[in-house]
Image (cartoon, rainbow, N blue to C red):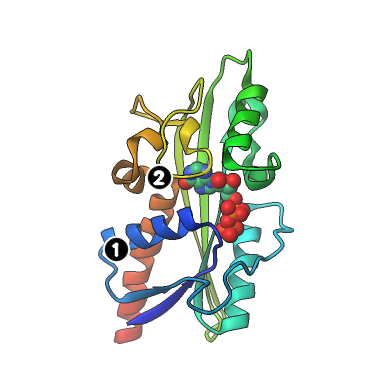
Amino acid sequence: MTELLLATNNGGKAREIQTILHHLGIEDIKILTLSDVHLSGFAVEETGHTYEDNATLKAKTLADKTRHLTIADDSGIEVTALGHKPGVYSARYAKGSDTDRCHKLLKELEGKEDRSAKFVCVIVYIDPHGNERHVFHGECKGLIAPALQGTHGFGYDPLFVPEGYHQTMAELGSDVKDQISHRAKALQAFATWWKGHKKVHET
Ligand code: ITT
């Protein structure tokens, strides 16, 4: 069993990552959260301008500090009519709660015809012993709904209607989200790599 630290303070992300890895049949990883390593709330300043830079900052800081194999997720929502904003700045788009940020997005989209958007996720894996870094990407396309709908998930889920569906992620819930989301796709890429990586290390 290999211990893998999830460098996130976002409970929604942590729950999804654990569930998705389980669904992907990765049974040889034991997930550690920040609270397992007595670092709950330990925040890394996200000074990068790309998802990859910020995910690397978060994973590397925690890997160096704890010496555990570590993954971090940096993600955001990109809205076409807003010039692909808020993107990497999605968590800081407005002060306050996830709901406040959803309302700001709706306000900025008032009167705009194009409601297309996508969720983006970049997961970075760091091995502090082998000095290894690997990067995994995932995207999920969709539309911004006219109002907040649904109670599942977190962040911008009440506003995001994924392509091929008529309800928001927050209405569809985790059974659907964990199959089609940007995070699920990045973790599928991680799982494929992990299975190959383990084989190489076992032979
Ligand atoms: P950590 O850095 O501790 O992981 P965070 O919430 O600050 O947590 P980010 O910096 O990556 O994470 O910001 C991601 C932003 O994008 C944040 O506002 C989320 O609510 C939003 N977001 C990311 N994935 C999402 C998802 O699956 N559903 C809805 N919103 C999402």
Q: Is residue 178 visible?
A: yes
Q: Residue at x 57, y 70 (%)?
A: 40
Q: Give the residue pinned by disc 2.
A: 181
Of residues 18 and 112, the one nearer the viewer is: 18
Q: Quadrant of residue 56?
A: bottom right
Q: Residue at x 56, y 19 (%)?
A: 114
Q: Residue at x 60, y 75 (%)?
A: 62
Q: Give the residue pinned by disc 1.
A: 22
Question: Looking at the picture, how far across and down is residue 81, in whole percent?
Answer: 62, 24
State which tag comes first along the sequence, 1 or 2: 1
Q: Residues within 10 Å of mark 2 (few under 14, many from 20)?
A: many
- Which three-letter amino acid code belongs to the residue tagged 1? His
Q: Quadrant of residue 3?
A: bottom left
Q: SS for tag 1?
A: helix
In the image, residue 54 above or below residue 77: below
Asked if the residue at label 2 sits under 8 Å from ligand 1, the reply is: yes
- 149 relative to 174 in the view: left or right: right
Question: Looking at the picture, how far across and down is residue 90, in whole percent?
Answer: 63, 43
- 108 relative to 129 in the view: left or right: right
Question: Looking at the picture, how far across and down is residue 150, in whole percent?
Answer: 41, 32
- 99 relative to 149 in the view: left or right: right
Measured Cα–Cα span from mark 1 to mark 2: 15 Å
Asked if the residue at label 1 sits under 8 Å from ligand 1, the reply is: no
Figure quadrant of the C terminus: bottom left
In the image, residue 118 above or below residue 174: above
Name, please, the residue furthest toward the right.
47
